[in-house]
Image (tube, rainbow, N blue to C red):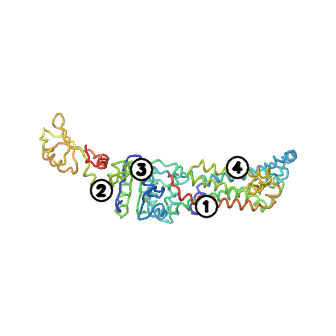
Amino acid sequence: MPAGAVYGFLGPNGAGKSTAMRLLCGLVRAQRGDVEVLGLDPWHDAAEVHDRIGVLASDQPAPRHHTGASLLGLIARLRRRPEVARRGRELAERLELDLGKRGHELSLGNRQKLGLVLALAHDPELVILDEPSSGLDPLLQREIRSMLREIVRDGRTVMLSSHSMPEVEAVADVVGFIRGGRLVVQAPLAEIADRAVRRLSLRFATTVDVARFVELESVIELDVDDDGLGVHVIHRGSVSPVLEVAANLEAQTIEASPADLEATFLALYRGEEPRP
Amino acid sequence: MIALTADLVRSRRVLLGGVGLALVAIAVGYLALYPSLEEQLANMAADLPDVYRALLGDVDLASPTGYIRSQVYSLLGPLLVAGGCIAAGSSLARAERDRTLAVMVVTPLGRRRVAAAWAGFVVVAALLAGVAIVVGVTLGAPLAGTPVSLMSTLGATIPVVVFGVAAGAAALLGSVATGSPGVATALGWSVVVWGFVSNSISELIVSASWLASVSPWAWHGSGRGIGGPVDATGLVLLTTMSIVLVTASVHWFQRRDLHV
C-alpha cells in the first residue's frame, strides 16, 4: 500500500476484505504469511500500531452505555491524549453529529459518523475504514471524501474498503481487488480506468459515416439504431478521440455510461483484456 | 487501565446501584422479621435433621447471629454477590458479541490491560456488593435485637466478597477464552455450584472436610463467620484461584482472535 495515498480495497461480499482489515488491525492472527503495518507486526506490536492507526469497522455499533461525548472522553483517556476530545468535537461538528445521544439512540448513519470521529480524532498516520459510507446520505459521503483527501494532503494514508465501485473510484489513488481471499489486481486507479471499457451514446441530426469511429484504435464495438441517428460506441481508454470524431460529425447529444470497473478487474484477473 | 475500569463502573452505575440497594433491602428486611420469627425458628431448628442442617451451612437458626448467617450470608448474600460478579465478568464477552469491544481494543491500551481492567471491574463489583451487605447488616442487626460489631460484619462479609471475585474471575476466563456470554456465565455459576457442593460433601465425608474451606455456605456455620474467626485457608485458596484465573484470562486474551 503506497504511503500518502487513498488505497481503495475492493471486492465482492465475502471476498475477505473485512478479514484482511482485521489482520491489519491485529484483531486476528495470520495463519500463514506476514502482516506488516507501518513497519510493525500488528499482532505482536499491537499497542504501537494502534497508537498510529485509526480504525472504523464495518457497521460499527456504538456502546449503549455511552453518549458520543463520554465515549470520546474515554478514548482520549485510553490514548492518553486529551486533545483527542477537542479534535473529536470538531469532527463531530463537521459531520453534524450530536454527541449528546447515547449509543442505542443513534441511527445507522449517526453510528457511522461516530465511528469515523473515533477513528480520525487522534490524527492517525494510517486510517483503515471498512465501508465508511454505508448508511450515509450523498452530501455526507461527499464530506467524507473531502476529509479523506485532506488526510492524504497531510501526507497520511487511507485504506478504504468497499464493495461499491463508484465510492472507491471517487476518492482512491490506488486500487486493490480481492477475490476469494486473494489480492488479484493492484494498480493505480488511472491505469485501471484507462483499460476499462466504456459506452458512449451519441445522437446525430442526420445519418453519419460511422466508419470514422470504427477506424479509431480505441473503439471495440459499434451499434447503430434502426433510424441511423443513434450511435453507441464502446471504447477503451481515453474518450478524447471518440469525442473529436463526434464533434466533427456534429453530434447533437452525448451520454456516457460509467465504466464497469469490476468487469475490468475480473478480466485483468483472468489475464484478458476487458471486453464489453 | 484504571480509566477503563472506572468507565466500566461508571457506565454501569445504575445496575450496580440497583444490586447494592437490593442487598441492603434484603438484609434489613430479613433482619427486621427476626423478632416475629424467633419462636418458630427455635422449634424448626430443634426438629431439623443433622444432615439437613449441615446442607444449610450448619447454622444455629434460632439465635440472632445464626439467623443473620443463615439469611444473609449463607444463601442470598453469596448468590447475589456472585451473580453480580459473574455479570461483570461475562460483560466482556457481551461487549465482544455486540462488537462494542472493538472501540477499546484498537486503542494503544493493549488487550492485556483491557482484560486486567475487566478483572478490576469484577473486584469493584464485589467490593460494592460487600459494602451493601455491611450497610444492610449494620442497619438491620438492631432490628433483629442483637448488636453486631463492624469487625464481625466485615469478618463475615469479606469471604463472600472473595468468593464472588472467584466466581467473577471464572466468568472472565470464560469471556476471554470463548467470547461467548453463555459459556462465561455458565463457568461463573459452576464455581457457585461447586462451592455449594463442597459444603455438602465436606459435612458428609470426613476425608473431604477440607472442602469446607472454600465454600461460603460452610464459612458461616457455627463457630465461624459473624463473631467467629475468619477461615484464612479458604480466603487464601479462593484468592489464589482468582489470581490464577485472572492471569490465565489476561494471557488468553492476548492470544485469541477477536470477532469484533
Report the residue marked by disc 2.
Answer: A188
> In what element is the residue under mark 2?
strand
Q: Gap between marks 4 and 1, in whole Å? A: 23 Å
Q: Hey, what amino acid is under mark 4?
A: Val
Report the residue marked by disc 3.
Answer: A16
Report the residue marked by disc 4.
Answer: B193
Residue B97, given in percent of the width and then of the height, sits at 54, 49
Total marks placed? 4
Q: Nearer the viewer, mark 4 or mark 2?
A: 4
> In what element is the residue under mark 1?
helix
Residue A50, given in percent of the width and then of the height, sits at 47, 62
Report the residue marked by disc 1.
Answer: B247
Name the quadrant containing residue B40: top right
Q: In the drawing, does residue A129 fall left or right of residue B157?
A: left
Name the quadrant containing residue B43: top right
**Residue positioned most to the front:** B207
Q: Residues within 10 Å of mark 1 (few under 14, many from 20)?
A: some
Q: Residues within 10 Å of mark 4 (few under 14, many from 20)?
A: some
Q: Gap between marks 3 and 1, in whole Å? A: 34 Å
